[in-house]
Amino acid sequence: MTPATNPIIFAISRIENMMYQVTFDPSKGSGVIAANVSIIRDSDLNDALLIFKGVMKSGLGVGSYIRAIRDQESFGNIRLGRRECAIITPCSITIDSVLLKSGVSVRPIFGGIVQIKKGVPVRFTDILTYDSTTIDPIDALMSQELTSVTDVGSTGSGKILANVRVVPMHARERVEGVLETLKSANFDSILFVGEPNTEVLGVPIERDHIGIVAIGGTNPMAAVQEQGIPIRTQALSELIDIDEMEMV
Amino acid sequence: MTPATNPIIFAISRIENMMYQVTFDPSKGSGVIAANVSIIRDSDLNDALLIFKGVMKSGLGVGSYIRAIRDQESFGNIRLGRRECAIITPCSITIDSVLLKSGVSVRPIFGGIVQIKKGVPVRFTDILTYDSTTIDPIDALMSQELTSVTDVGSTGSGKILANVRVVPMHARERVEGVLETLKSANFDSILFVGEPNTEVLGVPIERDHIGIVAIGGTNPMAAVQEQGIPIRTQALSELIDIDEMEMV
C-alpha cells in the first residue's frame, strides 16, 4: 500500500543517521559537526546575529560557534530565496555523536521545554519523544511559542528548549570525561546530568540508566522569534566542518 | 524533584479523560460530544463560517454540526479577547467514545497528515503518536502548514489531517455497526477501515488489531489558515451537548 519510495521516517532515524556521520573530535578540535540551519531575511541578519551571539554568550546555545551565509543560493540541501541568508549553528546531536564515538551506547530520547527559575533548571513542562514523531520535535515545540529564552537571558527565569539522552549507568565516568573534553572544545551545553534510576527534571528515566539534559541548539532561533523577527529553522539538516565555523 | 502540582500530561491521558466524559448516543442523537474550539476575529467570522461549512459539506470534517459563539467573554475554559469569537465543531474523539461505550476496547494511537489523490486516501506522510507528546498533535501538525485541505475540496487531491485508532479484530462487526449508526446521526467521518494484521495507509498496526482512520475534526480550521485568516484552535478542550449545535 505504501509506495516504497516515500516511507514515513521518525525523528530518531534521522538523528541516528546524523550521529553516525559526525566526525568531530573534541580533543583535536577538528572534524564535522551536526548543525542547524536558520533562514532569515537579509535585512534582519545583523539583528539576528546580535541576538544569536547574546543567547550563546549567556550559555543558552550549543557550542560557541556560528557561521553566516550571505549571497548564496543554497547551503547544503537548503535552498535560499532572494534576499534571504542563513545562519549555521551547532546542533546538540554533535554531543550524542561524540559520546557514541567514545564507545558509550547513548540514546537520544526526547526534546522539550525546561522551566528555569533564577538560573536553576526546575522541570520539563512539555516533551515530545523522538521515536514517535515524523515532524522534527524542535520545529513542533518552537512553533507553539512556548519559550521565553530572552527572559532567561535577562532575568535568569523563563523557559528554554532542551533535550534528553540516556546512557547506561556504568558509563558515568567515561561520560563525564567526554563532557569535560567537549567543554574544553567550547561545547559547553550540558544543563543537568542525572543520577542512576532517578528522574531528570520531572521525567522518569529507564532503569539503570542516567539521563543527560543538554541545552537545545535552537534557543538562539527561539529568541529571534520571540522578538518578532521571521525565522525558519531546519533542524537535523546539515553537517559542517568545525573549521568553517567562527568562534563567538 | 517535580512539583506534584505540575506533572507533564501526555496527549493520550487528556484524550482518555475526554472519552470517558462523552455521553453522546448516536441512536438517540442526544448527549454530550467532544468538541474543538477555534478562536478568530469578529471581522473574520463570516468568511470562516463559509469555509468551515464548505469543508464539512465536502466531507472533510467530523460530523455535520457547528456552533458560533459571539459577544461572550468565554466559552467553557476558553477565554475570548475583545473582538474575538469562537466556532465550536465536533472532535473525532466523539467517535472513539461511542465505540468505547458500546464495549469495544478502542485505543487512539496517532494523528497525522494523509495524502489524497483524486479522492482516494494514499498514505500518511507525517504522524505523531498520542502517548509520546504533551503538545497536542493536531496543534503541532497544523502549525507546520503541511495541509492543503482547500485543494482536496476543489480538486480531490492534496493533504488533510486524519487520525488512527486500533480495535481488536474480533470487534470488527460491532465496530462496523457502530460506525453505521454514527453515519445515520450525521457523524460520517471514517476515511478507511483496515483489515486485521494489515497496515493502514502505510503505517503498521498492532497484531490482531484493525486500524481505523478518521478524518481530523480540525480540517476546517486548517482550510481557514490556508486562506491566511488567523485562527487559533484549542483541540481536546471542551464538551458540549449536541442540542446546542446547529446542523450544517
Image: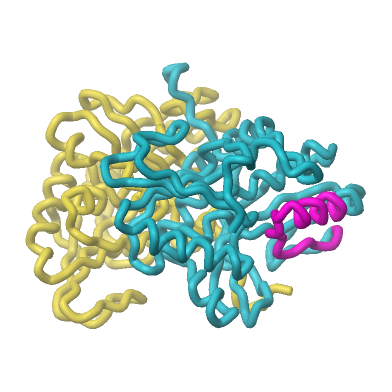
Chain colours: A cyan, B yellow
Q: Where is residue A13 in the image (x, y as percent from the top left)?
A: 60, 34
Name which residue lies at 39% across and 50% down.
A232
Asked if residue B13 is among those painted magenta in the image, a careful observer would answer: no
Q: Position of residue B154 (x, y in %)?
A: 12, 35
Q: Where is residue A54 in the image (x, y as percent from the top left)?
A: 53, 68
Task: Report the number of discs.
Answer: 0
Name which residue lies at 51% across and 38% down.
A237
Question: In the rendered view, would you say B175 is above or below A182?
Answer: above
Can residue B177 be seen in the rendering of this structure? no
Q: Between residue B37 and residue A135, name the one nearer to us.
A: A135
Which quadrant of the structure image shows residue A230? bottom left
Question: In the rendered view, would you say B245 is above or below A217?
Answer: below
Name which residue lies at 58% across and 41% down.
A244
Q: Is residue B91 left or right of residue B100?
A: left
Q: Position of residue B229 (x, y in %)?
A: 18, 58
Which quadrant of the structure image shows residue A212? bottom right
Q: Between residue B232 and residue A177, name the one nearer to us.
A: A177
Q: Is residue A160 left or right of residue A205?
A: left
Name which residue lies at 50% across and 61% down.
A52
Q: Between residue A179 and residue B237, name the one nearer to us.
A: A179
Question: In the rendered view, would you say B224 is above or below B8?
Answer: above
Which quadrant of the structure image shows residue A126? bottom right
Can residue A196 be seen in the rendering of this structure? yes
**Magenta-tinted stretch:** A175-196
Asked if residue A185 is among those painted magenta in the image, a careful observer would answer: yes
Q: Is residue A31 left or right of residue B125?
A: right
Q: In this view, does A169 lie to the left or right of A86?
A: right
Q: Quadrant of the N terminus of chain B?
A: bottom right
